[in-house]
Image (cartoon, rainbow, N blue to C red):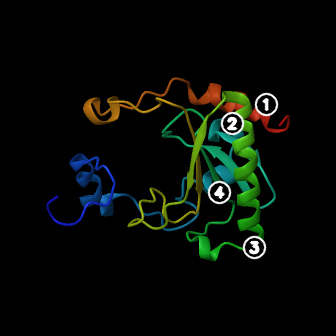
Amino acid sequence: MMGGEADGFERLWTPHRMAYVRHSSDRPEYAGEHECPLCTKVTGDDREGLVVHRGEHCYVVLNLYPYNPGHLMVCPYRHVGWYTDATDAERDEMGALTQHAMRVLTHVSGTKGFNIGMNQGQVGGAGISEHLHQHVVPRWTGDSNFLPIIGRTKAVPELLDDTWERLTHAWDEV
């Protein structure tokens, strides 16, 4: 092995991602709540904004650019960018809503796994780095294929409005 000792990992080289890394500073920064796309959902129409549930300190919203059907984000209402700046109440409710989102997604769509996480700051990969949000991405066997890499296309087999309707109606049932 060139460049080091074998570590047991296979490598999936994705040089096409360098364009994203090199141009990460080209992504818009939102100076305040009035520009932030996650803040606009705080007072807007739930269906139009794809808000699935509203809690006391946080809300749950469908990702406008989902990795998979049912890709949710749990966001505090408050315009805060770092997990370390979240209040205890915001942090605790984000956790509880994430758990409930997993239960709802499992009930509605039979998901077999999840990716859950936060990207902090632009360098950390956050598309909207100024407003904290935790991703809840349902996963199924075989849900990834060649399309994103070869065809630069992501196949999402369900319309956002259909997903919103199913999740919103199931939220209080589960």
**Secondary structure of residue under mark 3:** helix
Q: Label 3 near label 2: C-beta < 8 Å?
A: no
Residue 165 to residue 30: above or below: above
- Residue 48, position in %: x, y? 64, 36
Residue labelled with disc 1: 169
Q: Which mark is residue 88?
A: 3
Name the residue located 30 percent from the left edge and 34 percent from the top edge. Answer: 152
> Which mark is first along the chain, 2 or 1?
2
Q: As shown in the figure, which amino acid type bears the numbered disc 3?
A: Asp
Looking at the rendered structure, which numbered label has been put on residue 75? 4
Q: Is residue 101 left or right of residue 125?
A: right
Residue furthest out toward the left: 2
**Residue 132: quarter of image:** bottom right
Helix, strand or loop at label 2? It is helix
Name the residue that disc number 2 marks: 105
Amino acid type, mark 4: Cys
What separation in Å lies between label 4 and label 3 (alpha carbons)? 14 Å
Give the residue at x 31% y 63%.
25
Q: Secondary structure at mark 1?
A: helix
Mark 4 vs mark 1: which is more N-terminal?
Answer: 4
Classed neighbour count for the residue bearing mark 1: other residues with Cα under 10 Å, few (<14), some (14–19), many (≥20): some
Q: Does 116 sit above or below residue 165?
A: below
Mark 1 vs mark 2: in front: 2
- Disc with the residue nearer the chain's start (3 vs 1): 3
Please report the residue visible at 56 percent of the width from the left and 56 percent of the height from the top: 117
Label 1 is placed on what type of residue? His
Is 42 in front, or is 68? Answer: 68
